[in-house]
Image (cartoon, helix red, strand yellow):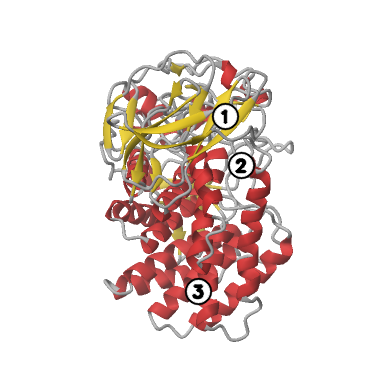
Amino acid sequence: MRFPRWLPVLTLIGSVAVAAPAQAAPTGAQLRLDQVGYGTAEAKRAYLMSPAAVSGQFSVIDERGRTAWSGRVGGSLGAWSAKYRAVQPIDFTGLERAGTYRVRAAGTTSPPFRVGRDLFGPVADRTVEFFQAQRDGADVVPGRLGREPAHLADRSATVYATPVFRGDGGDELAEPLRPTDVRVDVEGGWFDAGDFVKFTHASAYATASLLFARRERANPALDAESRFGLRWLDKVWDADAKVLYAQVGIGTGSPEHGFVGDHDVWRLPEADDALDVRPGDEKFFIKHRPVFRANEPGERISPNLVGRVTAAFALSAQLEARHDPRLARAHLERAASLFALAKTEGVGELVTAFPHAYYPEDSWADDMEFGATQLALAGRALHDPRAAGWARAATHWAAVYLKSGDTDTLNVYNTSALGHYDLVRLLRAGVPGAEVTEAQVLGDLRRQLRSGVDAAARSPFRTAADVAAFDVATRSFGFAATARLHRELTGDRSYDAFGVGQRNFALGANAWGTTLVVGVGSRFPECPHHQAANLAGGGHRVLVGAVINGPNAAALFDGLGELPDGAVPCARSYPAEFDSATSRFLDELRSWPSSEPAIDFTATAAVAFTLS
C-alpha cells in the first residue's frame, strides 16, 4: 500500500512544453487517443466516446487544417458508462507521414498528437526527471522542485529488530520497536512513492529495470540515475556481514508506542534534518529512521529480494564489462555472493516491506530466474567459469516458475518477462543440462500476452489492465514492454497492435482523456499525492515524468478524509460523468488510490518507452 494547488496545464509535444488552452466542460462526444503520438509503422487507433453510437466519416487533419487521412468511424466496442453508451474505434493506421495532427469526428476535435520516429525516447528521458526528484541523501538534483539534501542522519542509522504487527494483516504495531547495537550507512537511494520511506524491494526492481533499458537501447539520460540506484543497493547489501537491509523508515506511527511515522507528517524531506529530537520523542523516527533487515547475519534471505538485487548488480556487470572490467567483476561478485544466500526451501512469507501488506508479493521463482539469467550473461561477458552453472540455475528457476501457476505479468510483483527474454538468449547460445526449452519460455511470454489480449477484448477501450484495481498504469506499460520483447525475440508482430494499444491507454486513450504520466501530453495529472511536489509550490514545479497509479475501484474514493495538516489544496476537475459505475479517476491531492506516483510504476514505463 502506498500513502499518501493548482498547477497550470502543460502540453508536452515531443520534448517541448507549451501552455495548453483550457478545455470546456464535456458535452456530447469525446475523442480519446495517445497524446504523445504513434510511430510511423504502428497501429494507430483513437476512440470516439459518445452517449449513443454514431455513423459517418472521420478525418485526420494536419497543422494547416488539411485532411491527411479519412475513413469511417467503426462500430461500437461496448458501453463505458450510463452516460457514454458507445465507444467506437477510429483507425488511421495507414497514415505514415511524419507530422502533427488532430482527429475530427462527430463534431469534436482531438488534442494534437504526432506521427514520427523516436517519439518515446524523449519521454523515457522525462521519467528520469521523476527519479531525480525522488533522490534522498546528499546527492540530490535540485530540479523543478528545488530539492535539497535530506535525511543525512541515514549515514549512521540504527538497525532495529524485525517489527511485529498485529495479526490482521494491517500496519498496527503489536510491540515497540527494538533497537540493536548495529549502525549502518543507508544514506541515498530513492523515496518509494509520495512519501519518504525507502524499500529495497521496489528500489531493486526500479534499478534493474533502468539498467535493463540502458542495455537494450543506449540512453545517456538513464546512466546517472541507474548508477545512483545501484550505489544505494551496494549499501544495503553488506556482503561481509551477509546481511541485506530491506527498509529505511517506518510508514505508520503508533500512538500506543508513542511515535509518529512517515505517513503521519506532511512536510518537505529536508525538514526532518532540522528536528531536535531524542529517543522517546514523538518524531524521533522521522529524523532517526529505523532500518530493518531482511535476514539475520549469515542466514538465508527472502528469494524475491535476492533475485532482483542480484539482477541489478549483474546487469551493471554486463554494462561495465567492456568499459571498466574491474568494476564489472566487483559487481559480479556482489551479485554472486548474494545469490548464494537465497532461501529457496521453507520460504514462508516473502520479505517485501514492513508490514508485508504494503507490497503483498507471493511470487519469487521469477525473481530467481531473473537474477540467475543476468548472472549467467555477466559471467559470459567476463569469461567467468561459473557462468554455465548460473545458466543452468536460470533454467531450473524458470521451470519452477512455469509449474507455479503464477499468471501475473510484468510489474513490481513479477519480473518473469525480463527473465524470460534473456533466458531465451542463453538457451539459443546453449545451456547443457537445461531444465526448460526455448519453446516453453517463449510459450509463457505468449501466455502472458494472450491473457492481456483476452482481457482487452472485454474492454471498450481495449485495455488489458483492470481499471477497477490497483496498478493500472504500470500494468499497461508492462504489457507494452512485453509485446516488444516478444517481437525482438521472435520477429512475430502479431502482438504489436495490442502492445501499442496498452501504451495508448496510459497516454490518453482512456475515458478521462488524460495521460497517466505527469508533464506528458496535453492533459495530465497535476495534483499527485506527493509531499515534495505539493509543498514545493506551483508554476513550473510540476513532478515531470512521474507515473501515477491511474483509475481505480470507485469504492476506494469514498471517505478519503481531510487534507493532511500543512498540505496545500490541489484539485483538477474531471467530471464524474467520465467515471463508470465501477471505476473512477480523481486528480486530487488526497486521492492516493489514483494520483500517487511510485518508482516501480515509473521504471516499468521507462522500459516500455525505451523499447517503443
Judged left or right of residue 506, residue 392 is right
**x, y percentage for residue 186?**
40, 49
Give SS at disc 3: helix
Place residue 424 in its image quadrant. bottom right
Mark 1 or 3, which is nearer the eye?
A: 3
Find the distance from the CA under tag 3 to the CA under tag 2.
Answer: 28 Å
Question: Which residue type carries mark 3?
Answer: Arg
Q: Nearer the viewer, residue 363 or 284?
A: 363
Q: Does 163 sit above or below residue 451?
A: above
Q: Nearer the viewer, residue 71 or 575?
A: 71
The residue at 62%/69% (across/down) is 441
Residue matched to label 2: 465
Q: Nearer the viewer, residue 394 or 517?
A: 517
Q: Can I make out residue 607 in this image?
A: yes
Q: Does 532 sit above or below residue 603?
A: above
Question: Which residue type carries mark 2?
Answer: Ala
Quadrant where the N terminus sits is top right
Q: Does 390 sit above or below residue 4?
A: below
Judged left or right of residue 302, residue 127 is left
Q: Which mark sits nearer the N-terminus, 1 or 3?
A: 3
Residue matched to label 1: 593
Q: Which circle marks residue 425 in the picture? A: 3
Q: Which mark sits nearer the N-terminus, 1 or 2?
A: 2
Disc 2 residue crowd, few under 14, some 14–19, many 20+, Cα 10 Å: many
**x, y percentage for residue 7?**
35, 20
Disc 3 residue crowd, few under 14, some 14–19, many 20+, Cα 10 Å: some
Give SS at disc 2: loop
Find the distance from the CA under tag 1 to the CA under tag 3.
Answer: 39 Å
Q: Can I make out residue 411 in this image?
A: no
Q: Which mark sits nearer the N-terminus, 3 or 2?
A: 3
**x, y percentage for residue 433?**
63, 85
